[in-house]
Amino acid sequence: MTSIDLLKDVVKSLDGLPDLKKEIVSINKTFQFNVSDGSPFYVHAGDGEVAVNEGTKTPSAATIIASEQVLTDLFTGKLDGVQAFMQGKLKISGDIFSVQKLSSSILKARK
């Protein structure tokens, strides 16, 4: 399963988790994911919904660059985001605090 598929599953699960969905929607930002060995995608949280789409979206609050494996490991909880960032496996430009909030919410939804 690819990282975008994992995120789409998380978004589907949010219908059963209204408080968490509200938390993610409140971020009200778009996040661009540039997959170094795959296709780019973006997550938009706001306007009452959370959407995952293929392609690029500008402007975005932050751009996240990583390999497919690193993103998959992050979204499944096998890899800590801060550790990946410090090791250079994950690059973030823009609003890093909103990225941390999104990442934390994704992990809560996966549980």
Image (cartoon, rainbow, N blue to C red):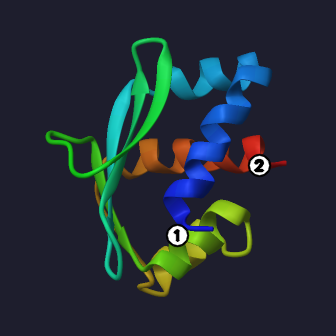
* Residue occupied by mark 1: 71
Q: Point out residue 43 in the picture as x, y percentages from the top left corner.
A: 40, 41
| Residue in the image at 14% along x and 42% along y | 58
Residue 50, position as x, y percentages in the image:
49, 28
Q: Quadrant of residue 69?
A: bottom right
Q: Quadrant of the N terminus?
A: bottom right
29 left or right of 111?
Answer: left
The answer to whether residue 106 is above or below residue 46 is below
Q: Nearer the viewer, residue 5 or 49?
A: 5
Q: Amino acid at mark 2?
A: Arg
Q: Is residue 4 left or right of residue 103?
A: left
User: Which residue is painted at 40% across and 75% down in the image?
Assistant: 66
Left or right of 40: which side holds 86?
right
Q: Are marks 1 and 2 in contact (CB under 8 Å)?
A: no
- Tag 1: amino acid: Leu
On screen, residue 51 above or below 52: above
Q: Which residue is mark 2?
A: 110
Q: Quadrant of the rendered structure where residue 19 is?
A: top right
Q: Earlier in the sequence, mark 1 or mark 2?
A: 1
